[in-house]
Image (cartoon, helix red, strand yellow):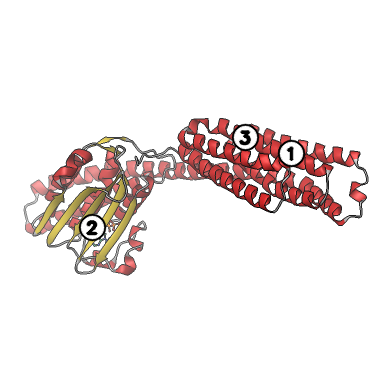
Amino acid sequence: MPTKRLTADQRHARLIAKVALLAAAGNLIVSISEGHHALTTPWDAWGVPLLAAIYAICAGVAWFKPAWLRAAAWCALVPASVFMQGSLCITLQHPDQRGLYNIAAVMQFMPLLYVGAYTTLRGRSALWLCWGHYAVLMLQFGISWLLSRDLPFDPSHTQVMIQQALITTAVSHPLYILALPYIVRLRRSLDQARQDSYRSKARFLAMVSHELRTPLQSMLGSVDLLGMRLSAPADQRVLTRLRVATHQLQTHLKDITEYTQLEDPALSLQDIPVDLVTLCQDLLDDQRASIGDKPLALRLDLPDPERPLLQHAHGDPMRVRQVLLNLLVNAVKYTNQGEVLLRVRSSTTEPGMVCFTVEDTGMGIALRHHEAIFQPYVRLDEAKAHSAEGTGLGLAVVKRLVDRMEGHLTVNSTPGVGSRFDVILPMLHNA
Ligand code: ADP
Protein backbone atom coordinates (compact mmCIF):
# COMPACT_ATOMS: atom_id res chain seq x y z
CA MET A 1 0.00 0.00 0.00
CA PRO A 2 1.52 3.35 -0.96
CA THR A 3 2.35 5.62 1.98
CA LYS A 4 2.03 9.34 1.31
CA ARG A 5 2.22 12.23 3.72
CA LEU A 6 -1.29 13.63 4.07
CA THR A 7 -2.27 17.25 4.47
CA ALA A 8 -4.33 18.33 7.48
CA ASP A 9 -7.47 18.49 5.27
CA GLN A 10 -6.89 14.99 3.94
CA ARG A 11 -6.39 13.65 7.46
CA HIS A 12 -9.60 15.37 8.55
CA ALA A 13 -11.51 13.89 5.59
CA ARG A 14 -10.21 10.42 6.45
CA LEU A 15 -11.28 10.75 10.05
CA ILE A 16 -14.76 11.80 8.93
CA ALA A 17 -14.81 8.86 6.49
CA LYS A 18 -14.07 6.45 9.34
CA VAL A 19 -16.82 7.98 11.48
CA ALA A 20 -19.27 7.77 8.55
CA LEU A 21 -18.37 4.10 8.08
CA LEU A 22 -18.98 3.47 11.78
CA ALA A 23 -22.33 5.25 11.48
CA ALA A 24 -23.22 3.01 8.50
CA ALA A 25 -22.34 -0.11 10.51
CA GLY A 26 -24.30 1.23 13.51
CA ASN A 27 -27.37 1.86 11.36
CA LEU A 28 -27.23 -1.68 9.99
CA ILE A 29 -27.00 -3.16 13.50
CA VAL A 30 -29.91 -0.98 14.70
CA SER A 31 -31.98 -1.97 11.67
CA ILE A 32 -31.39 -5.69 12.22
CA SER A 33 -32.02 -5.62 15.97
CA GLU A 34 -35.13 -3.40 15.69
CA GLY A 35 -36.52 -5.68 12.99
CA HIS A 36 -35.82 -8.67 15.20
CA HIS A 37 -37.82 -7.14 18.08
CA ALA A 38 -40.60 -5.91 15.77
CA LEU A 39 -39.94 -2.26 16.70
CA THR A 40 -39.77 -0.88 13.18
CA THR A 41 -42.37 1.08 11.26
CA PRO A 42 -42.20 0.78 7.44
CA TRP A 43 -40.47 4.21 7.48
CA ASP A 44 -37.68 2.83 9.73
CA ALA A 45 -37.52 -0.50 7.88
CA TRP A 46 -36.60 1.37 4.67
CA GLY A 47 -35.02 4.47 6.05
CA VAL A 48 -32.36 3.02 8.37
CA PRO A 49 -30.70 0.65 5.83
CA LEU A 50 -30.97 3.36 3.17
CA LEU A 51 -29.13 5.77 5.49
CA ALA A 52 -26.50 3.09 6.13
CA ALA A 53 -25.92 2.86 2.37
CA ILE A 54 -25.73 6.67 2.04
CA TYR A 55 -23.21 6.92 4.91
CA ALA A 56 -21.06 4.15 3.40
CA ILE A 57 -21.01 5.88 -0.02
CA CYS A 58 -20.18 9.25 1.60
CA ALA A 59 -17.38 7.57 3.59
CA GLY A 60 -15.90 6.31 0.31
CA VAL A 61 -16.17 9.76 -1.28
CA ALA A 62 -14.54 11.49 1.73
CA TRP A 63 -11.71 8.93 1.79
CA PHE A 64 -10.86 8.95 -1.92
CA LYS A 65 -11.92 12.51 -2.83
CA PRO A 66 -11.25 14.65 0.24
CA ALA A 67 -12.01 17.80 -1.78
CA TRP A 68 -15.64 16.63 -2.05
CA LEU A 69 -16.07 16.28 1.71
CA ARG A 70 -18.55 19.17 2.04
CA ALA A 71 -20.73 17.91 -0.81
CA ALA A 72 -20.67 14.39 0.67
CA ALA A 73 -21.57 15.81 4.08
CA TRP A 74 -24.63 17.61 2.68
CA CYS A 75 -25.66 14.36 0.95
CA ALA A 76 -25.48 12.49 4.27
CA LEU A 77 -26.77 15.10 6.72
CA VAL A 78 -29.88 16.24 4.83
CA PRO A 79 -31.31 12.68 4.41
CA ALA A 80 -30.45 12.00 8.07
CA SER A 81 -32.40 15.10 9.12
CA VAL A 82 -35.36 14.20 6.85
CA PHE A 83 -35.39 10.65 8.21
CA MET A 84 -35.43 11.85 11.84
CA GLN A 85 -38.19 14.39 11.20
CA GLY A 86 -40.25 11.76 9.33
CA SER A 87 -39.80 9.25 12.12
CA LEU A 88 -40.95 11.84 14.66
CA CYS A 89 -43.92 12.87 12.53
CA ILE A 90 -45.16 9.26 12.37
CA THR A 91 -44.63 8.77 16.10
CA LEU A 92 -46.48 11.93 17.08
CA GLN A 93 -49.53 10.67 15.23
CA HIS A 94 -49.51 7.38 17.19
CA PRO A 95 -48.05 8.16 20.61
CA ASP A 96 -47.97 4.57 21.93
CA GLN A 97 -45.18 2.62 23.63
CA ARG A 98 -43.38 1.85 20.41
CA GLY A 99 -43.57 5.58 19.70
CA LEU A 100 -41.85 6.29 23.00
CA TYR A 101 -38.98 4.01 22.00
CA ASN A 102 -38.83 5.68 18.60
CA ILE A 103 -38.66 9.17 20.09
CA ALA A 104 -35.91 8.16 22.52
CA ALA A 105 -33.91 6.54 19.70
CA VAL A 106 -34.26 9.47 17.28
CA MET A 107 -33.60 12.12 19.93
CA GLN A 108 -30.39 10.53 21.11
CA PHE A 109 -28.98 10.54 17.58
CA MET A 110 -29.86 14.17 16.85
CA PRO A 111 -26.82 15.64 18.68
CA LEU A 112 -24.68 13.51 16.34
CA LEU A 113 -26.30 15.30 13.42
CA TYR A 114 -25.24 18.65 14.94
CA VAL A 115 -21.68 17.42 15.60
CA GLY A 116 -21.52 16.03 12.04
CA ALA A 117 -22.62 19.41 10.65
CA TYR A 118 -20.02 21.34 12.65
CA THR A 119 -17.12 19.04 11.84
CA THR A 120 -17.81 18.77 8.11
CA LEU A 121 -19.68 21.87 6.90
CA ARG A 122 -18.36 24.29 9.53
CA GLY A 123 -19.34 27.95 9.90
CA ARG A 124 -22.62 29.36 8.64
CA SER A 125 -23.70 26.26 6.69
CA ALA A 126 -23.54 24.17 9.86
CA LEU A 127 -25.49 26.82 11.72
CA TRP A 128 -28.21 26.89 9.05
CA LEU A 129 -28.57 23.12 9.01
CA CYS A 130 -28.71 22.77 12.80
CA TRP A 131 -31.15 25.62 13.45
CA GLY A 132 -33.22 24.59 10.41
CA HIS A 133 -33.48 21.08 11.77
CA TYR A 134 -34.42 22.37 15.20
CA ALA A 135 -37.03 24.76 13.76
CA VAL A 136 -38.77 21.93 11.88
CA LEU A 137 -38.66 19.88 15.09
CA MET A 138 -40.38 22.65 17.04
CA LEU A 139 -42.90 23.12 14.24
CA GLN A 140 -43.80 19.45 14.47
CA PHE A 141 -44.23 19.64 18.24
CA GLY A 142 -46.38 22.76 17.90
CA ILE A 143 -48.62 21.28 15.20
CA SER A 144 -49.04 18.01 17.07
CA TRP A 145 -49.93 19.91 20.25
CA LEU A 146 -52.46 22.06 18.39
CA LEU A 147 -54.04 19.07 16.66
CA SER A 148 -54.37 17.01 19.83
CA ARG A 149 -54.66 19.56 22.58
CA ASP A 150 -55.32 16.90 25.17
CA LEU A 151 -51.94 15.17 24.62
CA PRO A 152 -50.02 17.08 27.34
CA PHE A 153 -52.78 16.36 29.86
CA ASP A 154 -53.42 12.76 28.92
CA PRO A 155 -53.07 10.66 32.04
CA SER A 156 -51.58 7.70 30.10
CA HIS A 157 -48.07 7.02 31.39
CA THR A 158 -46.59 6.53 27.91
CA GLN A 159 -47.95 9.80 26.65
CA VAL A 160 -46.66 11.70 29.68
CA MET A 161 -43.21 10.23 29.01
CA ILE A 162 -43.38 11.22 25.35
CA GLN A 163 -44.33 14.71 26.41
CA GLN A 164 -41.36 14.88 28.81
CA ALA A 165 -39.00 13.63 26.10
CA LEU A 166 -40.22 16.39 23.79
CA ILE A 167 -39.79 19.09 26.45
CA THR A 168 -36.24 17.87 27.24
CA THR A 169 -35.39 17.98 23.55
CA ALA A 170 -36.83 21.44 23.09
CA VAL A 171 -34.66 22.74 25.95
CA SER A 172 -31.43 20.77 25.45
CA HIS A 173 -30.96 20.95 21.69
CA PRO A 174 -30.41 24.72 21.46
CA LEU A 175 -27.71 24.24 24.10
CA TYR A 176 -25.92 21.68 21.90
CA ILE A 177 -26.23 23.94 18.86
CA LEU A 178 -24.87 26.93 20.78
CA ALA A 179 -22.10 24.95 22.51
CA LEU A 180 -20.63 23.57 19.29
CA PRO A 181 -19.62 26.89 17.64
CA TYR A 182 -18.33 27.98 21.05
CA ILE A 183 -16.02 24.91 21.17
CA VAL A 184 -14.90 25.57 17.58
CA ARG A 185 -14.16 29.23 18.42
CA LEU A 186 -12.32 28.20 21.58
CA ARG A 187 -10.13 25.82 19.60
CA ARG A 188 -9.41 28.47 17.01
CA SER A 189 -8.38 30.99 19.66
CA LEU A 190 -6.14 28.36 21.31
CA ASP A 191 -4.42 27.76 17.95
CA GLN A 192 -4.04 31.51 17.54
CA ALA A 193 -2.55 31.85 21.03
CA ARG A 194 -0.09 29.04 20.23
CA GLN A 195 0.94 30.78 17.01
CA ASP A 196 1.32 34.15 18.79
CA SER A 197 3.41 32.64 21.58
CA TYR A 198 5.65 30.90 19.05
CA ARG A 199 6.04 34.09 17.01
CA SER A 200 7.05 36.24 19.97
CA LYS A 201 9.54 33.57 21.12
CA ALA A 202 10.96 33.26 17.59
CA ARG A 203 11.25 37.06 17.27
CA PHE A 204 13.10 37.28 20.58
CA LEU A 205 15.39 34.42 19.62
CA ALA A 206 16.12 35.86 16.17
CA MET A 207 17.09 39.14 17.78
CA VAL A 208 19.26 37.52 20.47
CA SER A 209 21.02 35.19 18.06
CA HIS A 210 21.66 38.05 15.63
CA GLU A 211 23.11 40.18 18.44
CA LEU A 212 25.29 37.30 19.67
CA ARG A 213 26.48 35.96 16.35
CA THR A 214 28.32 39.11 15.28
CA PRO A 215 30.49 39.46 18.44
CA LEU A 216 31.09 35.68 18.39
CA GLN A 217 32.46 35.88 14.86
CA SER A 218 34.77 38.74 15.81
CA MET A 219 35.93 36.82 18.93
CA LEU A 220 36.79 33.80 16.78
CA GLY A 221 38.67 35.99 14.30
CA SER A 222 40.60 37.71 17.09
CA VAL A 223 41.53 34.35 18.67
CA ASP A 224 42.94 33.19 15.34
CA LEU A 225 44.90 36.44 14.96
CA LEU A 226 46.30 36.16 18.47
CA GLY A 227 47.19 32.52 17.75
CA MET A 228 49.50 33.75 14.98
CA ARG A 229 51.25 36.24 17.28
CA LEU A 230 51.57 34.29 20.53
CA SER A 231 53.97 31.38 20.51
CA ALA A 232 54.48 30.53 24.21
CA PRO A 233 52.87 27.14 25.07
CA ALA A 234 51.05 28.66 28.06
CA ASP A 235 49.51 31.38 25.82
CA GLN A 236 48.53 28.78 23.23
CA ARG A 237 46.74 26.73 25.92
CA VAL A 238 44.72 29.78 26.99
CA LEU A 239 43.88 30.51 23.35
CA THR A 240 42.76 26.91 22.76
CA ARG A 241 40.43 27.13 25.78
CA LEU A 242 39.02 30.41 24.43
CA ARG A 243 38.54 28.90 20.96
CA VAL A 244 36.74 25.82 22.34
CA ALA A 245 34.47 27.95 24.52
CA THR A 246 33.56 30.23 21.61
CA HIS A 247 32.80 27.24 19.37
CA GLN A 248 30.65 25.79 22.16
CA LEU A 249 28.67 29.02 22.39
CA GLN A 250 28.16 28.96 18.62
CA THR A 251 26.90 25.36 18.75
CA HIS A 252 24.51 26.13 21.62
CA LEU A 253 23.12 29.09 19.71
CA LYS A 254 22.59 26.94 16.60
CA ASP A 255 20.91 24.13 18.59
CA ILE A 256 18.52 26.47 20.38
CA THR A 257 17.58 28.24 17.15
CA GLU A 258 16.96 24.91 15.39
CA TYR A 259 14.86 23.55 18.25
CA THR A 260 12.73 26.68 18.44
CA GLN A 261 12.14 26.62 14.68
CA LEU A 262 10.64 23.14 15.08
CA GLU A 263 8.09 24.50 17.55
CA ASP A 264 6.48 26.52 14.76
CA PRO A 265 2.96 25.05 14.37
CA ALA A 266 2.98 26.21 10.75
CA LEU A 267 6.28 24.46 9.94
CA SER A 268 5.83 22.58 6.69
CA LEU A 269 7.91 19.70 5.39
CA GLN A 270 9.06 19.22 1.83
CA ASP A 271 7.94 16.20 -0.16
CA ILE A 272 10.48 15.94 -2.98
CA PRO A 273 12.61 13.12 -4.48
CA VAL A 274 15.50 12.13 -2.19
CA ASP A 275 18.51 10.00 -3.09
CA LEU A 276 19.04 8.28 0.26
CA VAL A 277 22.16 6.44 -0.92
CA THR A 278 24.06 9.66 -1.68
CA LEU A 279 22.64 11.38 1.40
CA CYS A 280 23.90 8.59 3.72
CA GLN A 281 27.31 8.34 2.03
CA ASP A 282 27.81 12.12 2.32
CA LEU A 283 26.81 12.05 5.98
CA LEU A 284 29.34 9.36 6.82
CA ASP A 285 32.08 11.16 4.88
CA ASP A 286 31.37 14.35 6.86
CA GLN A 287 31.56 12.45 10.14
CA ARG A 288 34.92 10.81 9.40
CA ALA A 289 36.63 14.16 10.03
CA SER A 290 35.25 14.36 13.58
CA ILE A 291 36.60 10.96 14.68
CA GLY A 292 40.08 12.39 15.24
CA ASP A 293 42.56 9.82 16.49
CA LYS A 294 39.99 7.50 18.12
CA PRO A 295 40.23 3.84 16.97
CA LEU A 296 36.73 4.00 15.55
CA ALA A 297 35.38 2.58 12.27
CA LEU A 298 32.45 4.23 10.48
CA ARG A 299 30.43 1.87 8.30
CA LEU A 300 27.43 2.17 5.97
CA ASP A 301 25.33 -0.97 5.60
CA LEU A 302 23.13 -0.54 2.53
CA PRO A 303 22.63 -3.71 0.46
CA ASP A 304 23.06 -3.42 -3.33
CA PRO A 305 19.58 -4.76 -4.25
CA GLU A 306 18.01 -2.00 -2.12
CA ARG A 307 19.92 0.85 -3.76
CA PRO A 308 17.62 1.54 -6.78
CA LEU A 309 14.59 1.80 -4.47
CA LEU A 310 16.34 3.98 -1.87
CA GLN A 311 17.73 6.26 -4.58
CA HIS A 312 14.14 7.18 -5.46
CA ALA A 313 12.71 7.92 -2.03
CA HIS A 314 10.52 10.95 -1.25
CA GLY A 315 10.55 13.33 1.70
CA ASP A 316 12.31 16.32 3.19
CA PRO A 317 16.05 15.72 2.58
CA MET A 318 17.17 18.51 4.95
CA ARG A 319 15.14 17.13 7.85
CA VAL A 320 16.09 13.50 7.24
CA ARG A 321 19.70 14.57 7.09
CA GLN A 322 19.34 16.46 10.35
CA VAL A 323 17.85 13.39 12.12
CA LEU A 324 20.64 11.07 10.95
CA LEU A 325 23.34 13.67 11.55
CA ASN A 326 22.28 14.20 15.19
CA LEU A 327 22.27 10.43 15.80
CA LEU A 328 25.64 9.94 14.10
CA VAL A 329 27.24 12.88 15.93
CA ASN A 330 26.11 11.34 19.25
CA ALA A 331 27.32 7.87 18.26
CA VAL A 332 30.78 9.22 17.40
CA LYS A 333 30.82 11.53 20.44
CA TYR A 334 29.95 8.84 22.99
CA THR A 335 32.04 5.99 21.52
CA ASN A 336 35.76 5.78 22.23
CA GLN A 337 36.55 2.69 20.21
CA GLY A 338 34.93 0.03 18.05
CA GLU A 339 32.38 0.81 15.38
CA VAL A 340 29.60 3.20 14.41
CA LEU A 341 27.22 1.71 11.90
CA LEU A 342 24.50 3.33 9.77
CA ARG A 343 22.14 0.70 8.38
CA VAL A 344 19.44 1.60 5.81
CA ARG A 345 16.70 -0.74 4.57
CA SER A 346 13.21 -0.58 3.14
CA SER A 347 10.84 -2.04 5.72
CA THR A 348 9.68 -5.61 5.07
CA THR A 349 6.76 -5.35 7.49
CA GLU A 350 5.53 -1.81 6.80
CA PRO A 351 5.35 -1.06 3.06
CA GLY A 352 6.44 2.45 2.11
CA MET A 353 8.63 2.88 5.19
CA VAL A 354 12.43 3.17 5.33
CA CYS A 355 14.28 1.87 8.42
CA PHE A 356 17.44 3.72 9.50
CA THR A 357 19.57 2.28 12.29
CA VAL A 358 22.47 4.07 13.97
CA GLU A 359 24.40 1.61 16.13
CA ASP A 360 27.55 2.14 18.19
CA THR A 361 29.80 0.26 20.59
CA GLY A 362 30.03 3.21 22.98
CA MET A 363 29.23 3.93 26.62
CA GLY A 364 25.52 3.04 26.30
CA ILE A 365 22.53 4.42 28.22
CA ALA A 366 20.88 2.84 31.29
CA LEU A 367 17.28 1.69 30.74
CA ARG A 368 15.90 4.22 33.26
CA HIS A 369 17.12 7.09 31.03
CA HIS A 370 15.69 5.80 27.75
CA GLU A 371 12.69 8.13 27.88
CA ALA A 372 14.35 11.15 29.47
CA ILE A 373 17.07 11.53 26.83
CA PHE A 374 14.48 12.71 24.29
CA GLN A 375 13.44 15.63 26.53
CA PRO A 376 15.04 19.00 25.70
CA TYR A 377 18.12 20.03 27.70
CA VAL A 378 18.60 16.58 29.26
CA ARG A 379 22.24 15.49 29.49
CA LEU A 380 23.21 12.42 31.46
CA ASP A 381 25.95 12.56 34.09
CA GLU A 382 27.82 9.90 32.13
CA ALA A 383 27.97 12.26 29.14
CA LYS A 384 29.27 15.11 31.30
CA ALA A 385 31.87 12.80 32.88
CA HIS A 386 32.89 11.86 29.33
CA SER A 387 33.54 15.64 28.99
CA ALA A 388 31.63 15.62 25.71
CA GLU A 389 30.22 18.93 24.50
CA GLY A 390 26.48 19.27 24.08
CA THR A 391 23.31 21.14 24.91
CA GLY A 392 20.99 18.18 25.46
CA LEU A 393 18.92 19.24 22.44
CA GLY A 394 20.17 16.81 19.76
CA LEU A 395 17.79 13.94 20.55
CA ALA A 396 14.90 16.30 21.33
CA VAL A 397 15.29 17.68 17.78
CA VAL A 398 15.39 14.12 16.40
CA LYS A 399 12.21 13.19 18.29
CA ARG A 400 10.37 16.29 17.17
CA LEU A 401 11.36 15.81 13.53
CA VAL A 402 10.47 12.12 13.47
CA ASP A 403 7.06 12.91 14.99
CA ARG A 404 6.51 15.67 12.41
CA MET A 405 7.38 13.21 9.62
CA GLU A 406 4.94 10.67 11.12
CA GLY A 407 7.66 8.12 11.75
CA HIS A 408 8.73 6.04 14.75
CA LEU A 409 11.84 6.34 16.90
CA THR A 410 13.13 3.72 19.35
CA VAL A 411 16.27 3.22 21.40
CA ASN A 412 17.95 0.03 22.62
CA SER A 413 21.03 0.47 24.70
CA THR A 414 23.11 -1.28 27.36
CA PRO A 415 25.67 0.58 29.48
CA GLY A 416 29.19 -0.45 28.54
CA VAL A 417 28.04 -2.34 25.42
CA GLY A 418 26.59 0.26 23.06
CA SER A 419 23.45 1.94 21.74
CA ARG A 420 21.13 1.45 18.84
CA PHE A 421 18.66 4.07 17.59
CA ASP A 422 16.01 2.97 15.06
CA VAL A 423 14.14 5.52 12.97
CA ILE A 424 11.34 4.46 10.62
CA LEU A 425 10.09 7.07 8.15
CA PRO A 426 7.44 7.02 5.40
CA MET A 427 9.62 7.75 2.36
CA LEU A 428 8.71 5.26 -0.37
CA HIS A 429 5.55 6.40 -2.15
CA ASN A 430 5.89 3.78 -4.85
CA ALA A 431 6.58 0.79 -2.61
P1 ADP B 1 23.86 16.13 23.84
O1 ADP B 1 24.01 17.46 23.25
O2 ADP B 1 24.17 16.09 25.30
O3 ADP B 1 24.53 15.05 23.06
P2 ADP B 1 21.41 14.81 23.09
O4 ADP B 1 20.00 15.27 23.22
O5 ADP B 1 21.90 14.51 21.73
O6 ADP B 1 22.28 15.91 23.81
O7 ADP B 1 21.58 13.52 23.99
C1 ADP B 1 21.05 13.52 25.31
C2 ADP B 1 21.88 12.59 26.18
O8 ADP B 1 21.69 11.24 25.76
C3 ADP B 1 23.38 12.82 26.04
O9 ADP B 1 23.80 13.84 26.95
C4 ADP B 1 23.94 11.46 26.40
O10 ADP B 1 24.04 11.33 27.78
C5 ADP B 1 22.89 10.49 25.90
N1 ADP B 1 23.21 9.90 24.58
C6 ADP B 1 22.74 10.26 23.39
N2 ADP B 1 23.22 9.48 22.40
C7 ADP B 1 24.04 8.58 23.00
C8 ADP B 1 24.84 7.50 22.52
N3 ADP B 1 24.90 7.17 21.23
N4 ADP B 1 25.56 6.77 23.44
C9 ADP B 1 25.49 7.10 24.75
N5 ADP B 1 24.76 8.11 25.25
C10 ADP B 1 24.03 8.85 24.40
The reply, left or right, for residue 51 in relation to residue 154 is left
Is residue 46 at all visible to an observer of this figure? yes
- State the separation of the CA atoms marked 3 and 1: 23 Å
Residue 137 at x, y percent in the picture = 77, 39
What residue did someone put label 3 on? 123
In which image quadrant can residue 335 be found? bottom left
* Residue drawn at the location 19% of the way across and 52% of the way down: 342
Q: Earlier in the sequence, mark 2 or mark 3?
A: 3
392 or 9: nearer the eye? 9
CA gap between label 2 and label 3 equals 52 Å
| Location of mark 2 (residue) | 389
* Residue at the spot 93% in from the left edge and 46% down from the top edge: 150
| Quadrant in the rendering for residue 283 | top left
In the rendered structure, which amino acid carries the disc numbered 2? Glu
Mark earlier in primary sequence (3, 1): 1
| Between 6 and 19, the one nearer to me in the picture | 19
Residue beneath the point at 39% across and 38% down? 268
For discs 1 and 2, the disc positioned in front in the rendered view: 1
SS type, badge 3:
helix
How many angstroms separate mark 1 from mark 2 (CA)? Answer: 70 Å
**Quick one: label 1 or label 2, which is nearer the N terminus?**
1
Residue that carries the numbered disc 1 in the rendered image: 85
